[in-house]
Image (cartoon, helix red, strand yellow):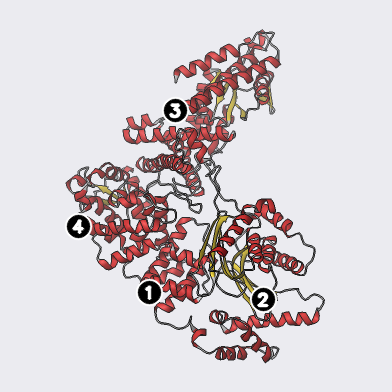
Amino acid sequence: MQDLLNKIEAAAEARLTFSSTTAPAEKLARYKTFLKVESHRLKLLHRGGADGREICQARAAILDALLRHLWVTAKSNLSAEAQQEFPPLALVAIGGFGRAELNPHSDIDFMFLHTGQVVAGKPLPYLAKLTDGILYPLWDLGLKIGYSVRDLDDCVKVANTDMQSKTSLIESRLIAGDEKLFAKFQKTVVGKCVLGYEEKYIAARLEDQATRRSKHGNSACMQEPNIKNGCGGLRDFQNLLWMTFFKYRTRSLRELQDREFVSESERKQLEAAYEFLLRVRTELHYHTNRPQDVLGKNLQPAVALNLGYEDRSPSQRIEKFMRDLYVHMRNVYLITRTLEQRMALVSPAQTGRIARLRRLLPGGRPRKMPEPVDGFIFVDDEIRAASNRIFRDSPRRLMRVFLHAQQRRLTLNPDLAQLIRNQTSLINREFLNDEHVRETFLTILDRRGEVGHILRAMHEVNLLGKYIPEFGKLTCLVQHEFYHQYSADEHTLVCLEQLDRIWEAKEEPFKNYAPIFLGLERPGILYLALLLHDVGKAGEHERGQHAAAGASLALRAAKRLQLESGATATLEFLVENHLLMANISQRRDLDDPSVIRNFARQVGTPEKLNLLTLLTFADSQGTSDKLWNGFKDSLLWQLHARAMTLLTGGTEFRRAGEEQQESLRQEVRQLADDRLAESELDAHFSALPARYFQIHLPKEILDDVSLVHRFFLQQAAEDERPLVPVVGWQNDPDRGYSLVKICTWDRAGLFGNIAGCFSAAGLNILGAQIFTRSDGIVIDKFFVNDARTGTPAAREAREKFDEVIGRVLTGGSVDLHALIVRQAAALRPTYSAYFGERLGTQIRFDNDASDDRTLIEIETEDRLGLLYIISQTFAELRLDISAARIVTERGAAIDSFYLSDVLGKKITVPEQLEQIAHRLHTAIGGLETVV
């Protein structure tokens, strides 16, 4: 490192030493050359694998050399007399520049420190000439600088009114100027801004840290981590040193180790992580040529490659790189959090603090510690070890300590957590096969509502993955699916915590699941299934087949845990089918009796249905809190209710098939008023397929008949505009959507035109039911929400849709594409792809999902006019859409359509299926040029 710094100094001396006759333009050119050459040298060293901290320090050294020469040049331009009378002035680096840690595009912050050189808000000549001589060249060079002009009183004032300013000043470093003034400044800052402000500063730092971590997901393993401000990022490391400086006046981890606050192992892990994170941030800056802190999914392959991860496969390259990154960020997050507790930076529980203060008061006596229980001391809401030998004396305590914590609602003392972390070597074959340990673990899983945080605590001390090695292989594992926001292990832990939230929940939607959660006889099986549901991702498996692989691993875990056969079968079923309920509820027509029958047959028992419902909800919540909504929740409950009816022998769902249609018609007749003629009811009941009556209640049928009645009245009143539809709106705030009913004459391309009108009005389609009467009357039902807010359609959107669809369906002059484009700029989510990667279009046909229709599933990038072009393609192929499920998640479209041919039959001819797939691929592939 010293050789590099010497080279920078030598280069500065050679290039930046000017004679008195050197022209300003030549000086500027040589400044630019110096920066360009030295910056390029650093980039080559970085790409060659140089230490991240060294590159940052070298970048700071380049700016130091430039600023010192600017200082000398500006001062030399003063007269000889002025130079003799030059007042005490100093150029001081602050913030990251003060730490001598600059990434390529980091802010360059410094301060002109003076004594009485500003009068009435204006600098005196000495200071003015000096600042101008430094600032103007820096601006001409295009550098991003932040500067201030302060005397000692100014520094004290700003430091004591703003925490960030105080932090930047305690990291200050003299670049050029009066050393005595700088020393006085440092002493003043400590004496007037640090002494007496320790508790206030640390409290503010902790509050800022909690807010920052919450903003960035409260996890060190996010799919797109923020290298600077995320959990386990650079700021966590820096924050620790700032707070320890205030409390203990230490400046480095080495000093903390000397004072036995940090072990040598912890120090080395933190230093290695910090160096790695600085390298990653430097590469982000180089690759994007701007300040960049978020390691976006699209940047990961290039960043990995430039950091030396050279696998030809982008996914393998990313997996190795991101796993290393997650390991380092996790170490920073866990170790800094532990150290904050160990060094009493975080206030303990109030009772514990009062007790400690009482011992410090005059006359206070040391409190007698409680007697140890099982080798542990329970005090101040913590568990402590009675001695450092407790686990060597009885390794079983490694598991029992977590049961104690769970039963007494205590946390592990940081020293105890470190002791466990250091003794996980005791988890050997004998420990894994120990019956007592096994029963303790299963007891922990059976305490519903109190499991997630305990398993997280186990994982944080590296015990959980060693005891359940199937789960251990998920640690810091990258999940490539677009909808996941966490690494695999973090996702699993979040799922467990989401399941805990159901216990005694008071808020929606969690409280709705509480009754079936409370009714479980074996909650431990559900917790174990959640713990293992994604373990198949850690091994080799075909795309989309990790559930089957996970089921095999779950059987291995069940055998080791000696679960009885019934519990083992349930565990295997839940792991193998953990995606089943989400897929069916969101991608299948729940109004199709065959869908419900097949699902109920696959589930088998009411107990499994309840377990699978809870697992599906917790898994969805743990995947991403932004992707679950009231509509998906209602679909899950709809599937649960209808399957439960079949599983318990009820007949409600099969009502239309078991009762005469005439009886149903009579109920509708009783609800109807005199405005509806008998002939209208007869026509409605004779003109629709049996499936319609199987899924509609009398009140819903009456609403549809009334809609048709309005349409015919409109036909009589407006015979010159027979194609104008009748539209009915019904908002459902609890489920977060609007139900839209449209009645009009059937015609080719109708579904696509309606879909386009919804997009033009800024509305997302969540699902659709499509029915056509034999007399050509269409009754289409769409579930939609506002694309911006995810809430039911507002009045403005409803009016926009009504106006556009009226013009489109009557042949008016409407540029539907232009209207969609206008909305899409602000509304359309973008698929978060790796650089150079596209989400390929996948098309699947299923002729077993329905008795009389073909199911087609399309998964592709969501893009402008997608649903419109798909439905138009179906129309061109003369295929009838009877139902649709429309799902958009993080820019990926996962849409399902139920189709029949012109004769109302399934599409079974292989050549025809091939033609459909080919036409869809062509239409979707050319969409961006079409629209």
Residue type, mark 4 in image: Glu
Q: Nearer the viewer, mark 4 or mark 2?
A: 2
Residue 606 - label: 1
State if disc 4 and disc 3 touch (CB < 8 Å): no
The residue tagged 4 is 435
| Residue 448 locus on image (x, y percent) | 34, 64
The residue tagged 3 is 51
Mark toward the start of the polypeptide (3 vs 4)? 3
| Residue 579 locus on image (x, y percent) | 43, 62
Q: CA distance from mark 3 to mark 4?
A: 48 Å
| Residue 3 locus on image (x, y percent) | 46, 17
State if disc 1 and disc 2 touch (CB < 8 Å): no
* Up-down relation of residue 40 to residue 564 (above or below): above
Q: Secondary structure at mark 3?
A: loop
Q: CA distance from mark 2 to mark 3?
A: 68 Å
Which residue occupies the foreground of this view, 153 or 207?
Answer: 207
Which residue occupies the foreground of this view, 424 or 685?
Answer: 685
State if disc 1 and disc 3 touch (CB < 8 Å): no
Q: Nearer the viewer, mark 2 or mark 3?
A: 2
Residue 703 - label: none
The residue tagged 2 is 778
Compared across the picture, whether 573 is left or right of 884 comes to left
Compared across the picture, whether 771 is left or right of 9 comes to right
Q: Secondary structure at mark 4?
A: helix
Mark toward the start of the polypeptide (4 vs 2)? 4
